Image (cartoon, grey):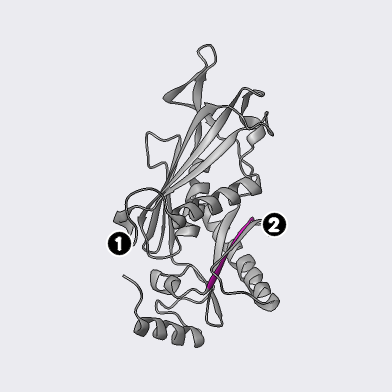
């Protein structure tokens, strides 16, 4: 169900007064809950809830052939399933643009941040490398699936263990894991998506707020403020001054969210 004009006008009126329906500030996320290791048959997994928005992320690894331009590095593939059970807006069948976009933005954030140490996933240069599969499933969509999926992917990767590999047979022993974690960098990079509604910028929108978004920018950055990826969506342009506001808000919010994500692994 789309947001009604009446609800939309009320949301815009509240934002103009510096308020939101649920009492949060424009720079505040809803409560974030991260549960790692929820799928016994995955090499790594996590469930992330941001308010009522919920996603599941699983990590599986297999042995494959490296890309021609990186013969000594592992590979990665990210897929997203926008399940109909999570929203009446989603339908079964081949992936549509929202699903493809979500997977690509999460893929870019992880890949460009160099969070996975792909050079340590080489088995035989030019012949065999580990491929990391990251599968994202939506359970409930109440806005901001992008950030929930990004946090879930990082949490699942942090939870992952390397599968056992039979070198003599040249195959993965599925269901059997080593004690070795997936090789990752210490600094995590997460996406923060900034939405513009009218003249206001905010993070972590509810479903109703997200329906009113005129433009959004997803920025992947780490605790040091280093930006590794950026994606703008929707057709509404941003002025240089507005874009500076987006960067400032992203930097402010990301540090706090990164601390919360890191705290879930202690």
Question: In the drawing, does residue 203 fall left or right of residue 93?
Answer: right
Q: Which residue is mark 1?
A: 88
Question: In the drawing, does residue 63 fall left or right of residue 58?
Answer: right
Residue 219 on the magenta segment: yes
Tag 2 and tag 1, C-beta contact below 8 Å = no
Q: Which quarter shows the N terminus?
A: bottom left
Q: Main secondary structure of the magenta part?
A: strand
**Image x and y of residue 7, in percent:** 36, 82
Residue 226, which numbered label?
2
Residue 149 on the magenta segment: no
Spatial distance from mark 2 to mark 1, Cα to Cα?
37 Å
Q: Earlier in the sequence, mark 2 or mark 1?
A: 1
Residue 151, which numbered label?
none
Of marks 2 and 1, the one in the foreground = 1
Q: From which residue to which does the magenta span run?
A: 215-222
**Image x and y of residue 173, in percent:** 45, 21
**Image x and y of residue 259, in percent:** 57, 57
Judge whether 44 appears above or below 255 on screen: above
Element under label 1? Answer: loop
Is residue 265 in view from this perspective? no
| Residue at image location 34% in from the left, 79% down from the top | 4
């Amino acid at each position: 169900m789309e947001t009604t004009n009446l609800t939309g006008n009320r949301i815009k009126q509240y934002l103009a007064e510096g308020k939101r329906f649920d009492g949060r500030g424009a720079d505040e996320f809803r409560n974030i809950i991260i549960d790692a290791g929820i799928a016994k048959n995955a090499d790594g997994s996590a469930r992330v809830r941001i308010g009522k928005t919920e996603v599941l992320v699983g990590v599986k690894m297999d042995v494959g052939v490296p890309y021609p331009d990186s013969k000594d590095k592992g590979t990665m593939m990210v897929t997203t399933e926008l399940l109909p059970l999570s929203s009446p807006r989603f339908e079964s069948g081949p992936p549509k643009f929202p699903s493809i976009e979500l997977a690509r933005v999460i893929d870019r954030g992880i890949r460009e941040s160099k969070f996975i140490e792909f050079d340590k996933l080489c088995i035989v240069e030019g012949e065999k490398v580990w491929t990391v599969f990251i599968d994202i499933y939506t359970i409930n969509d109440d806005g901001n699936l992008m950030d929930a999926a990004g946090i879930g992917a990082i949490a699942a990767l942090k939870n992952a263990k390397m599968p056992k590999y039979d070198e003599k047979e040249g195959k993965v022993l599925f269901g059997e894991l080593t004690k070795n974690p997936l090789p990752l960098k210490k600094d995590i990079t997460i996406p923060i998506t900034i939405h513009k509604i009218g003249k206001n910028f905010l993070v972590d929108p509810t479903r109703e707020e997200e329906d009113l978004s005129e433009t959004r920018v997803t920025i992947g950055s780490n605790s040091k403020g280093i930006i590794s990826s950026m994606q703008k969506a929707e057709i509404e342009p941003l002025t240089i001054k507005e874009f500076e506001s987006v960067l400032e808000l992203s930097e402010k919010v990301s540090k706090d969210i990164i601390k919360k994500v890191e705290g879930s692994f202690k």
